[in-house]
Amino acid sequence: MQLSKFSSTQNVRCPRRRCPNARRPGYLHVTAVFTLMDGQGQSMTYNKAQSIIGSSSSCDVKVAGPKVAEQHAAIIQKGKQTFLKPLVGEDMLDDSRSWKDGVALRPGVSYVLASGCRLAFGTPETCFTIGFEEGTGSNPLVEMMMKGMLASSSPEVKRALDS
């Protein structure tokens, strides 16, 4: 199992207005950080909002191991959430898979990660632990769901929540 380091930041073009914290006018400076630790305790830190994991030399996170595809999965950080999106494993003949905490994942689906999740690529034995600073404060998706549940709740529940 081999892990290599990639460290960079990503500039994102701001639409129609100047970004106040930009390094260059019209650009927003985005930095995302996560660390992967392998089974031997070796860890590498990556600074990128989206990192591709795979065996190809063009991948941000290079993982060598049996059944690891050239572009196997993506780790994506959006706002306060970090996601793993497997890119392979859909075909019946394709035995390349990704796992989160021992559970096989479907390709093309984004899975929310928590710091400390165990991720595996290719085989369940090619395992890593991901670490990152989890977002604090409210989550807009959870807030939206709670508002929807409150809107459809009974008058008794609404009164109890108001008091």
Image (cartoon, rainbow, N blue to C red):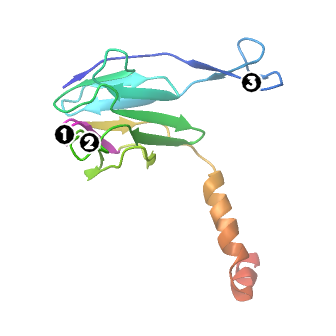
User: Residue tagged by mark 3?
Assistant: 14
Is residue 138 in sight in this rendering? no
Q: Which residues are magenta?
A: 117-127
Q: Residue 7, located in which quarter of the rendered image? A: top left
The quadrant of the picture occupied by the C terminus is bottom right
User: Residue tagged by mark 1?
Assistant: 123
* Residue 128, image x, y percentages: 27, 36
Magenta-span inclusion, residue 119:
yes
Q: Farthest residue in the right direction?
A: 17
Q: Secondary structure at mark 2?
A: loop
Is residue 69 in sight in this rendering? yes
Indicate left or right for 114 with 89 as reference.
Answer: right
* Residue 48, image x, y percentages: 50, 24
Within 10 Å of disc 2 (Cα), the crowding (few <14, some 14-19, many 20+) is many
The quadrant of the picture occupied by the N terminus is top left
User: Residue tagged by mark 2?
Assistant: 97
Q: Amino acid at mark 2?
A: Arg
Are the residues tagged 2 and 1 within 8 Å (C-beta)?
Answer: yes
